[in-house]
Image (tube, rainbow, N blue to C red):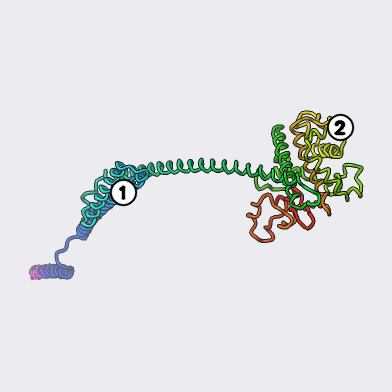
Amino acid sequence: MDSKNRSALSKSRLARTLAKVLHIRAVTGGNRKPKSQDKFKNEAVKNDVLNKGQLNSFVDKDEKLKKRAATEAFLANLFASISAVKSAYAELQFAQSPYDPEFIQSADEVIVSELKSLSELKHCYLTKQFDEYYSLETTLVLAEIKEQKSILKTYYIMGKKLDSQLKLILSEITFLRETLNEANKENKLLEKRLMREQVSDLDNLQLTKLSPSHFIMFLQQTIRSIRSFVMLLCREMEYAGWDLDAAALSIQPGIMFLKSSDKCYAFESFVCREMFDGFNHPQFLISKESTTEEKKQQRLFFNRFLKLRSANVADYLAWKPKSAFARFCCAKYLKLVHPKMESSLFGDLDHRNLLSSGEYPDTTFFSTFAEMAKRIWLLQCLAFSFDPEVAMFQVSSECRFSDVYMESVNEEAFLMSSGSPETEPRVGFPMVPGFMVGKTVIQCQVYLC
């Protein structure tokens, strides 16, 4: 009995155990594989999906690159053809003048050929066929070569065209230069004729018929004589190694010359200042014989004018070495030409030594100076021949410009002015003085800055 009960008990226990196992399987889904096997399987699937995605991505990128390369090749051919048309058209234009039929025909054939190429490109683009024709690697290089050749050809034609235009301009310049030379010759002839007329007017001059126009004519001759001496003085200074810029600034310190050639005006102002000093006094206060009564003797001064005007200055100085004019000439030279300047220009003081001994140098420099001095002396004689006598006036630096009393030798100074009082040009320094002939104003000449 006990053995039977033990057997039955073990069987019932086995049955309960099997029932629990079956219940657990039913709850968990029956026969399942281990978790480790499911994990490996899922990773394999994932890798397979990723590999397929990367492959598709690589394929898409490769197709895009091919399409982009084909597009670039198509555009390169398009621009190369356009450049070829442009160069051929430039060649066609250049062949028009001078007319070259062979050159024109060649350019026309190139234009027609390139227009056909452009038409083919348009057709390929519209039909989406350019991928097949322009995807080669060499296409880009060939198109670039073609475009560069066309550009070089265009530049070459432009260079030839500019060269022909330059030759035309040079020929026009030559023609204009010849025209200018002819005009200058005519001007010189007219100037000589005018001078002869002025000389004849002054030759037939009478005291009772004096007018401001006579004084103006002789003043113009005097100014030309002054400028001739200034030019000679500047040349001598250059030959002697002078720094003309520094010399000009020493005469007119603080002046900014608008042009480098304007420095000659500084020397002209210095010469005028020294030579015209004392102009309003009889005989420039050189002669001690000048009296108040002499100032009123218009006839006396007019006769001096007529007598000296027709004389040669060198002969007159040799004939009358102690005359009032001779003393004027000597005094003005010694005042105008400093000993250091004379020594620098000529290497000695022979001019001063001769003048001090009562003799006069026989040099080009002194004869040019003496001619200038004669003109200024005669101008004063003519001024005192008027009734009332002519009065000289001068303006000061930094004063405002007046159209009535002043004439500018550098008109470009007005271009730098904006019209405001702050930018209005001012007198840098005076040059040739002005004169009052009765109620007539003869403007003084000034340098503006």
Question: Quick one: SS at disc 1?
Answer: helix
Q: Which residues are magenta?
A: 4-8
Q: Amino acid at mark 2?
A: Ser
> Upstream in the sequence, badge 2 or badge 1?
1
Write down the residue under mark 1: 85
Q: Amino acid at mark 1?
A: Val
Q: What distance separates the C-alpha of mark 2 from that of mark 1?
A: 88 Å
Are the residues tagged 2 and 1 within 8 Å (C-beta)? Answer: no
Question: Quick one: SS at disc 2?
Answer: helix
Answer with left or right where residue 159 lies relative to residue 14: right
- Could you tell me if residue 13 is visible in this image? no
State the residue at coordinates (74%, 56%).
405
Answer with left or right where residue 312 lies relative to residue 92: right
Q: Position of residue 409 (x, y in %)?
A: 68, 49
Secondary structure mostly seen in magenta is: helix
Q: Quadrant of residue 439?
A: bottom right
Q: Closer to the camera: disc 2 or disc 1?
A: 2
Write down the residue under mark 2: 356
Q: Nearer the viewer, residue 397 or 401?
A: 401
